[in-house]
Amino acid sequence: MTRIDQMKYNTSYILGAILAIPVAIITGIISMNIFQFEMWIDTLIMLGSYIMTFLPVQQKAAHTYLKDIGLSKNDYKYVKKQLKIAAPKIKHLLAQYKKVRSLSELKNVNEINKLARVIFKNVQKAPSKFFNVDSFFFSHLDNTVNLLNEYLYLSRMPHKTKEDQQLLNHAKLTLDELKRTLQADLRALNKENYESMRVEINLADNYTTKQLFSQKQPQIEHKEKAPIQFKNRVHHEEERK
């Protein structure tokens, strides 16, 4: 998760503490001055009042945030865990720039990095999108990182045999396939956004069509009435004569 998203979730704990602390203090003062229990009982009462105030407030605030992003508590923790696992792999992809020795390799590494980072950062911002591209986190990212690492390492090795070169060429083609797979992941990630945009376009087109029709309707009516008015004017001129 991004720091902002993590702070939003942690706000539920902060809010719970802010409300629970004064309640616990007031309850403790009342207990000590009115009921005059023993010290350990007063302490338990303060602790109990803190917990009874903190938990409902924290859970309510956390539930509201999770509802806004469309995830359950368990799903949120699961996505957070998967992002934490993926973060070092994204950094490892960035490190591959150091191994680049040609413009074609630079282009491939740059495109792969861009695709992987866009997917990763978008899921950070919108955790519910994780389930649109879970295959990226479970297999596609690993395959890309591992193959790119091996390809760039072996391509720098001298004295390659014909068989070695063929294998490297095959690896390069496979990297192109993996790049297309990441592009498909990116499209899947934004599938809901494209659907939403399609709906907005249809609504806008319908509205525009209605507006054009309403503007043309008076013109059509005017053209239909024009011949009648013209005939009446001719008739009046003949009567005058």
Image (tube, grey):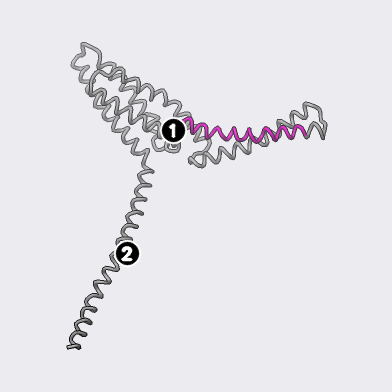
14 with respect to 31 (left or right): left
10 Å neighbourhood of mark 2: few (<14), some, or many (≥20)?
Answer: few
Task: Give the SS element for disc 1.
Answer: helix
Q: Quick one: 191 or 64, which is closer to the camera?
A: 64
The residue wearing badge 1 is 124
Res. 57 image quadrant: top right
Closer mark to the observer between disc 1 and disc 2:
2
Range of residues picked out in magenta:
1-29
Closest to the observer, 65 or 229: 229
- Residue at x-position 53% and y-position 36%: 73
| Label 2: element kind | helix
Q: Is residue 1 above or below residue 97?
A: below
Q: Which residue type does callout 2 highlight?
A: Ser
Quadrant where the image shows the C terminus: bottom left
Q: Is the C-beta separation of discs 1 and 2 under 8 Å?
A: no
Is 3 contained in the magenta span?
A: yes
Q: Which residue is painted at 52% across and 35% down in the image?
A: 8
Q: Main structural element of the magenta stretch: helix, strand or loop?
A: helix
Q: Amino acid at mark 1?
A: Gln
Q: Which numbered circle lies on residue 225?
A: none
* Structural distance between the alpha carbons of marks 1 and 2: 46 Å
Residue most toward the top? 159
- Report the residue at 66% width, 34% height from top: 20
Mark 1 Cα within 10 Å, few/some/many (few <14, many 20+)?
A: many
Of residues 160 and 204, which is closer to you in this image? 204
Q: Residue furthest front?
A: 240
Q: Which disc is residue 214 wearing?
A: 2
The residue at the point 35 percent across, 22 percent down is: 94
**Residue 52 drawn in magenta:** no
